[in-house]
Image (cartoon, coloured by chain):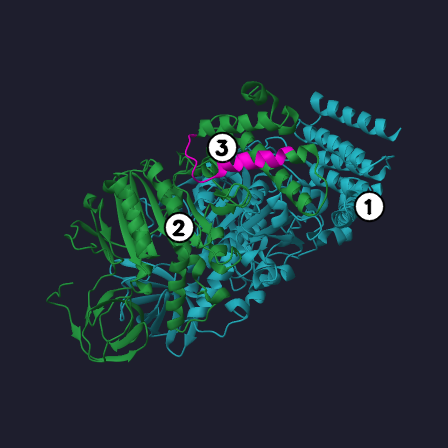
Chain colours: A cyan, B green
Amino acid sequence: MKTTGRVSGIISNIVIVKADGPVGQNEICYVYTGDTKMMAEVIKVMGDAAYVQVFDSTRGLKIGDRVEFEGHMLEATLAPGLLSRNYDGLQNDLEKMDGLFIARGSITDPLDFEAQWEFKPLAQAGDKVSAASWLGEVKEQWLTHKIMVPFAMSGTYTVKSVAAAGSYKVTDTIAVVTDAEGRDHNITMVQKWPVKQAVRCYAEKPRPARVMETGVRAIDTFNPMAEGGTGFIPGPFGAGKTVLQHAISKQADADVIIMVACGERANEVVEIFKEFPELVDPRTGHKLMERTIIICNTSNMPVAAREASVYTGMTIGEYYRAMGLKVLVMADSTSRWAQALREMSNRLEELPGQDAFPMDLSAIISNFYSRAGLVKLNNGETGSVTFLGTVSPAGGNLKEPVTESTKKAARCFYALSQGRADSKRYPAIDPLDSYSKYLEYPEISEYLDEHIGKGWVEKVYAGKTIVQRGKEANDQINILGDDGVPVEYHERFWKSELIDFVILQQDAFDDIDANCPIERQKMMYEMVLDICRKEFPFADFEECSQFFKGLINLFRQMNYSQWQSEKFNDYKKQIEQYVLAKTE
Amino acid sequence: MTTRAFQKIYTKIDNITKATVTLRASGVGNDELATVGGKLAQVVKIMGENVTLQVFAGTEGIATDSEVIFHGEPPKLKVSDNLAGRFFNAYGEPLEGGEAVEGEAREIGGPTVNPFKRLQPSELIATGIAGIDLNNTIVTGQKIPFFADPDQPYNAVMANVALRAKADKIILGGMGLTNDDFLYFKSVFENAGALDRIVSFVNTTENPPVERLLVPDMALTAAEYFAVDKGEKVLVLLTDMTLYADALAIVSNRMDQIPSKDSMPGSLYSDLAKIYEKAVQLPNGGSITIIAVTTLSGGDITHAIPDNTGYITEGQLFLRNDSDTGKVIVDPFRSLSRLKQLVIGKKTREDHPQVMNACVRLYADAANAKTKLENGFDLSDYDERTLKFAHDYSEKLLAIDVNIDITRMLDTAWELFAEYFSREEVAIKEELIKKYWKA
């Protein structure tokens, strides 16, 4: 028997419901107004009054309107066929909706229940299995999609039967398992999982030990992201957050990419809709859209669903991780999610924390970031969810609650600076403020030694020191004037400019420069570092700046040339001669 | 408003605050309109039997026995082609008398366009102002505000932009417009003979501030009618969004909500986004483009209103007084149109992106030279030339009184390059230099 209730109060999208039975925190219910059925979530219970947030507009809702409680929390539907889809924050398929406008109460299936999948069994009768054990697999696009024991099934089971290889619908039974008490459970390809709970069906969660390539030099070379790691990108508007996120989503070395457009501009999502089906992933030769899932809750869509969208994205990420895949989840922007929390907390008349955000903001954010990670599955395979969020700090001030709370939770910090954006130094990742904690991990250090070159981390720190010293020298030059400082100061400054222009800056709109593979990064960085270690006999500061300007120009031409092409090697030779001529 | 037979009339109000009244009533819907003592009001909160109404014009003179009549529906606008050429108040009633417009009544503040059904904006809007067309090209379906100090002529610039943009309809949403500015808009549109393609919803400083909250939704409901139903290119002008946000703050304050940054309600971002996100390029060829004004106090863009706006809109245009030429210019450094990449060099001449960047770079060099000069350092010959270039660039291209087409702007830029610089100093792709350099 479902609990039902009647609306007894309305404050914007918070509705107070008098319930006639048991109600759970975060339980889902449907509010009926006229013929429309709107989804809502319980966020507070006081006696028999349940406070629910409605994921839609409450316009026209009346006291006494009917409410039905569903007895479960907000769930994601997980099955083959999620890839390439465009969902709203509640996993309604946007593509299936009729009409130009999203009508109130639009609910569409997240899956195609009619599609047939070629199933191949992996388990056999008699196998001992538990939640997330692989029973079989189907081909989803070009990925091998494992069909698992549902995450929600606790305890161990014995496989009674597995369907033979063949074509099945997602709702067909593909296995029967028996529990300890001897009861049989039919398993289909579909399972549901409450989005706000982390999926924990794995053996262990080791420290990340591999680097996830993004093709962005300022990240890969200077502050690498670990596979299964967490990072965030704060920056004022106009600093290039979205361009950077899009670049990473196109180039990152991951099997599945989940883009959560959380409270941002619709036209930016339209760009993904338009580009991704056409762009090709250079690693696999497949279209980018084939590995991408978009969760889209733009700024004008209901606020409560905005909060849900990041959880929906993360849950789908954890689902693919359990198949032993590399998943990258990106959310743009987590500040909008925090603002959605603030709007709710405000309407509930909770005592506010800083800037009127809820007191537990910090805990909510770190709890969410902790769901990312590299995991060792029960069968010994590994899978990972790497999470990268953007933050839109109010007024560009990094001392605000969302940035500060995120800084505590995320391991990589890619600060976009207004100053760099103003002088068109893109990506505007500040080389001194930004950091990657993973550089300090011995595991990562070993990985880099092995995959890039011995002593790589020291080289990275050496480059950072050059940039730091260059900045200090530049400050002196600005105070004392070009002539007021020794020539070495200029040399120091220009060496940091060399790193900045050649390594840190990158043209996201150039076909070649946009994506820089790691071996190319290694070569360029070592070339630049070699030059920075040389001492040049400059007579005066003008000679110094002339020399470096010419050098930077040659390097940039090289960045724009096809890797190892004739032109590329020609520029390389030119650079070597140019430097040699000056040192002799 | 006429009373209909089934409407229940209440005559006992329990609580009255500056902006709200509370009474016991039943069968009332959320967001529904009502008349309280002859003034229009809207339901903002229902707690059991207690219904709280926000009275748009303020509660002055309302008594506990004033008549309250519920309308049974949220605010609506009657839409038809007859809206064109008319001036309305915030409630959609004709100003200066005149007959009410008949047509289909549509709820204002309606649902969102499915992002999946949108098209990518791709059509350029030419304004004749080089600070916009050359450096910050605007595209149909875009939303972009002017960030301006109150003393700058933003309304005049906006009126110019509106008239030159080849829009099928121009919808003016005036919030807290002074009566003088309202009359200015009216006469500019009249003199241009453009009245028949203009619809105005105006709340002047003489009207109660809370009424302003209806203006953007009214204007955009009309815009959606012309864009969605008629496939027209609609340009919506919203001035001044800062005053709109101020009205939001007043209401939230009177509803005892906890303020967040700069005393603004915590929902400011969502409130503004609901308006700006109505900008859209539709598959039927229709579009809604929003050009707004956000006035700043002392140029401070970190204040919550411009800050939230900047995160929502697709760029922003800054006006600045240029002391070298004595003209108002569109600031090339701080202004940005995020959608210009979709059209420049594609819908305009091939050299557009490079010329644009070269101009701004040289202008930046001039700014550095100026700093040098101010700090008492010597100027090089190059510095001197950049300063001369900056003066001409500002006067012939950036000034808002310039009105030429984009090809002419590009030619002007090439003329300036040739006058002050060598080909190497301009640093544009070799093939473009060969083709366009003015010897």
Q: Chain of mark 1?
A: A
Q: Observer-nearest residue: A186 or A153?
A: A153
* Residue A565 placement (x, y as % from top left): 69, 23
**In the displayed image of the protein, which residue is found farthest to the right?**
A584
Q: Observer-nearest residue: B110 or B427?
A: B427
Asked if badge 3 and badge 2 are on a common chain, one would say no
At x 54%, y 55%, the residue is A392
Q: Quadrant of residue A536?
A: top right
Residues in magenta, as a range: B385-405
> Which residue in the protein does label 3 denote?
A278
> Which residue in the protein does label 2 denote?
B276
Helix, strand or loop under label 1: loop
Q: Looking at the image, is mark 3 or mark 2 nearer the viewer?
A: 2
> Which residue in the protein does label 1 denote?
A485
Q: Looking at the image, is mark 1 or mark 3 nearer the viewer?
A: 1
Mark 1 vs mark 3, CA separation in Å? 54 Å
Relative to A357, residue A556 above or below? above
Kind of residue at badge 2 = Tyr
Q: In terms of secondary structure, what is the magenta stretch mainly?
A: helix
* Residue B95 placement (x, y as % from top left): 21, 55
Q: Chain of mark 3?
A: A
* Residue A232 placement (x, y as % from top left): 61, 53
**Number of numbered discs visible in the structure rendering:** 3
Label 1 packing within 10 angstroms: few (<14), some (14-19), many (20+): some
* Residue A132 placement (x, y as % from top left): 56, 54
